Image (cartoon, grey):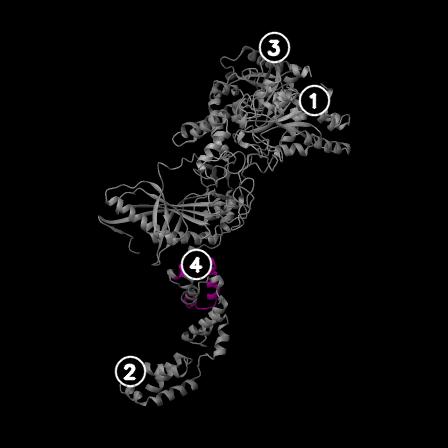
């Protein structure tokens, strides 16, 4: 286990207690209660139905596709699926909320308690409780930059389905909060229910932060709204925890409130206090009947789920002998895991994992590219690994070849041939080189034979150098020993 | 007064099919009548040009021997139904200038069956009222006058007051209404016509401006039970665009109509004999009981023990839903906008100017009962009582096939009466609200005139989705009552 996260205050150590509410935009063709398209980035107000614009007399009709996405997500979180759930109206006025209420789920959400495993950096895991998952409508967007005095409204997003996924307050460091978001994102992407694109806003997190002395009961929490990157989540929690500790240590008390993270200043600031909190006047939406699911359908959705990251990780560890850390890296994205399995097929899985993680990820990272844009395909990298395996090239040469592959997109074989990098494994040829080296360094041969064992490395180095790195290092060792000792 | 206007819908339908008359002739007669009776203020918008165009198209189809169930029949539509290209106001200032780019499902059904649109009728603002005096477009006058105060204008009831008045005044052959707590039945009773509130879910709510979603239901208003049945048969139907729309098939009402009530068990609920019920209302109720008995029905005394809580329950649930339903009228996208220095100010200005007093009162009540700290005591409690009211009816319908009650606790009062105290006005719904809360179908049938010469209706309630029994009993009452009285203005042409 890693050391528990503690903040050193003037009065001693403090711990943080964190819970996350993640809003994940559901991948679906149409909105939650209307047939309008959910495509991102279209021209303003081109994906707005009469329902989305809340025209008089318009009624919502539930989109089954969105419901099934929520069920898939719930199943992936090993959560209770509620066969009966209820849509409520959350009432408040805002210009980008055409109905004057958001259709959400309040008392009876579609998904109940579940669990998510964090993959900690030391290879261990931590279980985080999921409190609930419910479906709700997104609001439209206010555009403040179109006119000096006026605010314009874009309703394209109005009515798009969101899943609000609420964790239990089980997280206890900024890193864990970040890992939680990453793992949740990974699961959502595996089951194809949210693209997890935080820049485009398809995943946003509200973080509840409180602090306490270890062993004390829970402190008063503040909610930091609407964060769209793991980095900001880290920063906001660190700032907010310190802020609360300072208040408490100077004898103050924490006001339960909603806060915003100012990314420019790296600070959280008050948005509204509990007293100013909206009274949302939730009540069951009379336009919709309770949502009733069929257990058989739920079971069928469960049966269709892909292998999930935790299971895949366990399999990679058991079948491929990978370390938990490497396995966790490889399974985070389904595409990466698939890529790896393609690479590892029929090859040494550990060597394959090393080449992918250390070499390819490193190169991609430097180039600012994703695996999908990799100039080296799984087959191509496999080709390189094969050349090492069959002794055509040495590991050292392989790195050179790899760099060339990444640069030019050529296959390992082509590069080896073109550049004459084929490893020399011909005994006669290597013996020839060794003879030259020994002849040129007769004095050192004397010293070696006189007991200076350490000179062996020198002869290996000289031989490799003379062969331009192409001599098979194993054979060089073996032949040198024979000639020097024999 | 031409003979054409005396034809019932069923008669007109037969004559149109036989080509004895044309839709154009019939429609022209109604357009002329609409103009002659315009002082009633029963229409907010008239569409004579559109009507003639539709009539012409109907005639063309009739000439080819084609045509739907309502081919060529001129109808009035309550101005709560959205009609494509025709202003739709809900009788509210806040919908100023609103012309829907869509057509409600119910009116679509009517036009698909060949009906002709005469115009949009006046109503209480957002259907909130029992007298049609809360309309931004002014009160509707009931075509009926009392014999004791012939100079006093009387209310047609509400909220579907305009629809009731145009049917009574012969300025439409029939009309659509909507009923949330009695808004079809009570005005039908006040105006001497027939009105049906179908089972909740029977008619699609899609495209009808919402008042209280769990209660709102469209229905027909017509001169006879048969006419109302014909209209309802076309209005009703499952609609995938309304999640609360029912899939249960409806009986062929025309076939059910004349089956008589012999052998039927008719319940008479003790709790409807409320204190202070006018003698005349009690008498007409007893008359109805006697008629049905004479027709061979068995009368059964029943109890609906939670009735006394119905009105209070209704005036929590309906405003609660309304407060949320009316939030969309915010000045941002359509209708009235009164600018302000901030978004909040714009909302406040728009809604203060756009909504009348009664609407504001109900939005406030609704907001209050849903508020944190009050929700359990009001809204949640009301939902529990609503379940008990439903259970009352379920139990009663184990022993009876239909229930007979008065429709309203009075005949039509004068414009200006009952306006000092909202609760007095709310009491108008005392007999209609329980069935609304339970979702049951009901009909009001004219049963006689009060001593001062004003119509009084009787209400028949049936089981969920049993409109067949409702019209069957209604038709028996209609036949027995032989109600042929018409307002003086109709008699005099």
Judge from the rendering whether residue B210 lies leftward or rightward of residue B61; answer left or right.
left
- 3D distance between C-alphas at marks 1 and 2: 122 Å
Q: Are marks 4 and 1 on the same chain?
A: no
Task: Say which residue appears at 50% left-offset and 32% top-offset.
Answer: B326
Q: Give the residue at mark 3.
A: B147
Q: Which class describes the residues within 10 Å of circle 4: few (<14), some (14-19), or many (20+)? A: many
- Label 1 vs label 3: CA separation? 26 Å
Considering the image in quadrants, where does the N terminus of chain A appear? bottom left
- Earlier in the chain: of badge 2 and badge 4, it is 4
Task: Give above or below for B200 relative to B454.
Answer: below
* Horizontal and vertical percent position of residue A360: 43, 66
In magenta, the rendered stretch is: A326-354
Q: CA distance from mark 3 to mark 4?
A: 88 Å
Q: Position of residue A396 (x, y in %)?
A: 40, 75
Foreground tag (3 vs 4): 3
Q: Position of residue A239 (x, y in %)?
A: 32, 50
Q: Are marks 1 and 2 in contact (CB under 8 Å)?
A: no
Marked residue chain, label 1: B
Q: Quadrant of residue B71?
A: top right
Q: Are marks 1 and 3 in contact (CB under 8 Å)?
A: no
On whether residue B14 falls in the magenta region, the answer is: no
The x, y position of residue B444, in whole percent, is: 60, 20
The residue that label 1 is drawn on is: B8
| Residue A331, disc | 4
The Cα atoms of the two marked residues, 2 and 3, are separated by: 134 Å
Mark identifier at residue A453: 2
Residue reaching furthest left?
A11
Q: Which secondary structure lies at badge 3?
A: loop
Mark 1, Cα crowd under 10 Å, few <14 / some 14-19 / many 20+, is some
Chain ID at mark 4 = A
In which image quadrant can residue B78 be found?
top right
* Nearer to me, A234 or A187: A234
């Amino acid at each position: 286990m890693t050391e528990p996260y503690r903040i050193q205050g003037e009065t001693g150590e403090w711990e943080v207690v964190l819970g996350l509410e993640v809003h994940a935009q559901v991948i679906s063709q149409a909105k939650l209660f209307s047939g309008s398209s959910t495509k991102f980035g279209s021209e303003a107000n081109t994906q707005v139905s009469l329902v989305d614009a809340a025209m008089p007399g318009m009624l919502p009709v539930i989109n089954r596709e969105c419901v099934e996405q929520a069920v898939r997500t719930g199943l992936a979180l090993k959560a209770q699926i509620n066969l009966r759930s209820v849509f409520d109206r959350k009432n408040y006025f805002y210009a980008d909320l055409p109905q004057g209420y958001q259709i959400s789920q309040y008392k009876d959400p579609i998904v109940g308690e579940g669990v998510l495993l964090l993959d900690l950096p030391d290879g261990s895991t931590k279980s985080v409780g999921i409190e609930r998952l419910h479906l709700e409508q997104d609001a439209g967007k206010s555009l403040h930059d179109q006119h000096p005095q006026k605010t314009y409204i874009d309703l394209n997003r109005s009515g798009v389905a969101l899943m609000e996924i609420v964790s239990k307050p089980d997280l206890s460091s900024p890193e864990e909060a970040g890992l939680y978001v990453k793992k949740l994102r990974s699961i959502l992407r595996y089951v194809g229910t949210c693209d997890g694109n935080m820049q485009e806003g398809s995943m946003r997190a509200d973080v509840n932060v409180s602090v306490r002395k270890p062993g004390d009961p829970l402190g008063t929490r503040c909610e930091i709204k609407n964060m769209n990157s793991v980095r900001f989540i880290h920063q906001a929690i660190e700032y907010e925890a310190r802020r609360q500790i300072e208040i408490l240590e100077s004898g103050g008390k924490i006001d339960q409130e909603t806060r915003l993270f100012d990314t420019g200043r790296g600070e959280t600031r008050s948005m509204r206090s509990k007293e100013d909190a909206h009274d949302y006047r939730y009540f069951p939406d009379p336009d919709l009947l309770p949502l009733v699911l069929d257990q058989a359908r739920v079971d069928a959705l469960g049966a269709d789920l892909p292998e999930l990251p935790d299971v895949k990780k366990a399999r990679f560890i058991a079948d491929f002998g990978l370390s938990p850390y490497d396995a966790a890296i490889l399974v985070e994205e389904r595409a990466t895991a698939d890529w790896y399995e393609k690479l590892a097929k029929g090859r040494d899985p550990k060597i394959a994992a090393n080449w992918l993680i250390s070499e390819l990820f490193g190169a991609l990272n430097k180039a600012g590219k994703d695996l999908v844009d990799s100039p080296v395909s799984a087959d191509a990298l496999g080709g390189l690994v094969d050349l090492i395996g069959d002794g055509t090239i040495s590991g050292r040469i392989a790195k050179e070849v790899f760099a060339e592959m990444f640069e030019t997109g050529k296959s390992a074989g082509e590069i080896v041939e073109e550049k004459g990098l084929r490893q020399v494994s011909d005994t006669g040829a290597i013996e020839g080189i060794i003879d030259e080296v020994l002849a040129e360094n007769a004095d050192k041969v004397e010293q070696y034979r006189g007991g200076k064992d350490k000179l062996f490395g020198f002869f290996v180095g000289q031989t490799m150098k003379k062969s331009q790195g192409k001599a098979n290092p194993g054979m060089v060792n073996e032949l040198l020993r024979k000639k020097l000792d024999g | 007064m031409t003979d054409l206007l005396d034809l019932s819908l069923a008669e007109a339908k037969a004559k149109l099919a036989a080509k004895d008359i044309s839709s154009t002739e019939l429609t022209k007669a109604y357009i002329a009548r609409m103009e002659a009776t315009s002082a009633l203020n029963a229409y907010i918008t008239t569409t004579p040009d559109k009507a003639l165009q539709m009539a012409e198209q109907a005639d063309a189809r009739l000439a080819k021997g084609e045509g739907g169930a309502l081919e060529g029949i001129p109808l009035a539509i309550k101005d709560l139904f959205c009609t494509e290209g025709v202003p739709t106001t809900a009788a509210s200032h806040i919908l100023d200038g609103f012309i829907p780019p869509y057509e409600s499902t119910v009116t679509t059904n009517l036009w698909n069956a060949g009906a002709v649109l005469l115009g949009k009728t006046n109503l209480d603002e957002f259907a909130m009222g029992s007298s049609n005096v809360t309309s931004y477009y002014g009160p509707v006058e009931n075509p009926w006058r009392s014999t004791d105060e012939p100079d006093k204008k009387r209310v047609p009831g509400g909220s579907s007051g305009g629809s009731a008045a145009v049917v009574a005044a012969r300025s439409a052959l029939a009309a659509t209404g909507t009923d949330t707590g009695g808004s079809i039945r009570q005005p039908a009773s006040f105006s001497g016509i027939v009105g049906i509130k179908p089972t909740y879910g029977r008619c699609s709510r899609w495209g009808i401006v919402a008042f209280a979603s769990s209660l709102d239901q469209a229905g027909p208003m017509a001169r006879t039970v048969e006419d109302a049945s014909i209209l309802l048969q076309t209005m009703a139907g499952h609609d995938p665009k309304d999640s609360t729309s029912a899939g249960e098939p409806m009986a062929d009402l025309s076939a059910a109509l004349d089956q008589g009530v012999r052998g039927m068990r008719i319940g008479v609920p003790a709790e409807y004999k409320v204190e202070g019920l006018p003698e005349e209302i009690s008498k007409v109720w007893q008359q109805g009981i006697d008629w049905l008995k004479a027709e061979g029905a068995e009368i059964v005394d029943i109890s609906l023990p939670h009735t006394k809580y119905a009105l209070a329950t209704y005036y929590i649930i309906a405003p609660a839903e309304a407060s949320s339903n009316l939030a969309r009228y915010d000045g941002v996208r359509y209708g009235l906008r009164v600018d302000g220095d901030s978004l909040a100010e714009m909302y406040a200005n728009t809604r203060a100017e756009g909504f009348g007093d009664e609407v504001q009162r109900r939005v406030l009540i609704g907001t209050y009962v849903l508020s944190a700290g009050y929700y359990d005591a009001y809204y949640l409690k009301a939902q529990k009582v609503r379940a008990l009211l439903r259970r009352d009816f379920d139990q009663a319908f184990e022993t009876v096939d239909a229930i007979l009650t008065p429709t309203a606790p009075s005949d039509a009062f004068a414009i200006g009466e009952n306006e000092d105290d909202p609760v007095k006005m709310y009491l108008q719904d005392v007999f209609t609200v329980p069935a609304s809360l339970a979702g049951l179908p009901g009909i009001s049938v004219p049963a006689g005139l009060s001593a001062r010469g004003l119509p009084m209706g009787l209400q028949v309630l049936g089981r969920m989705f049993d409109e067949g029994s409702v019209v069957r009993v209604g038709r028996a009452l209609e036949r027995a009552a032989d109600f042929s009285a018409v307002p003086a203005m109709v008699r005099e042409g």
